[in-house]
Image (cartoon, rainbow, N blue to C red):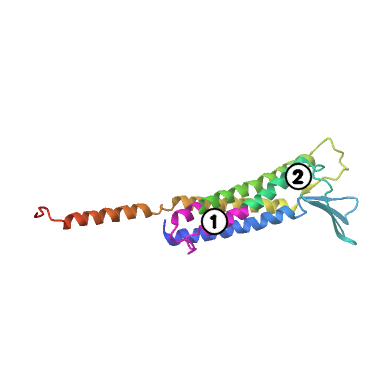
Amino acid sequence: MGLVFRTATQSATLLLSLLGWVLSCLTNYLPHWKNLNLELNEMENWTMGLWKSCVIQEEVGRQCKDFDSFLALPAELQISRILMSLSNGLGLLGLLASGCGLDCLRLGETQKGLKRRLLILGGILLWTSGVMVLVPVSWVAHVTVQEFWDETMPEIVPRWEFGEALFLGWFAGFCLVFGGCVLHCVACSSPAPPASGHYAVAGLGDGQRHLELKPANPEI
């Protein structure tokens, strides 16, 4: 793999991972994981996120309230809070590690092996962060679909539907997974630094040259 192509691929996938990380942070805090439209009052819309719920009224505007208790939340929202927070932290660490391991960065040029390991570590952290975004988003979507088609609930009861944050989270997760996997593959496919072998060959050449200069039958 050429150096120019490898450097361009690393930079492009790191930018894609950065975009996925920013979108995952927005997904975590946006109160639009679920939407509820009331047929009896079309002027009022409800939205729910991981941290708060909001009501939107044309006359009053948006009013949001944080959830009072973490333990009172449904299980999917509790786990989603934890996974999304961990995802944001791992994604930040992955971006820092991958950024320090880029070939185009002149910092640590003499430590090619360390930069290669940092790039591999960053790729693993990034795709792990992406998986930890896709899991809660897909779980909340699955529960929403089950509740929407629940035949035991009366038809007059309003049903929650997909919010915009779910689609944003899916896109963010795929960006992180794809970017992390490509960074990991590019780092693994790059040749290992020949530092120790180079010095060994150089030392062997010096010793051989010394033997050639030494006379075969020295006079005593």
Secondary structure category for the residue under label 1: helix
Asked whether 108 falls inside the magenta stretch, the response is: yes
> Residue tagged by mark 2?
77
Magenta stretch: give its range.
91-117
Q: In percent of the image, x 29 and y 54: which residue is there?
A: 203
Q: Quadrant of the N terminus?
A: bottom left
Label 2, label 1: how far apart the Cα atoms are = 31 Å
Residue 12 shows in the view: yes
Q: Amino acid at mark 1?
A: Ser
Q: Is residue 17 left or right of residue 50?
A: left
- Residue 144 placement: quadrant: top right
- Residue 15 placement: quadrant: bottom right
> Residue tagged by mark 1?
98
Secondary structure category for the residue under label 2: helix
Q: Position of residue 69 (x, y in %)?
A: 82, 46
Decide: few, some or many residues near mark 2? Use Cα within 10 Å; few <14, some 14-19, many ≥20: many
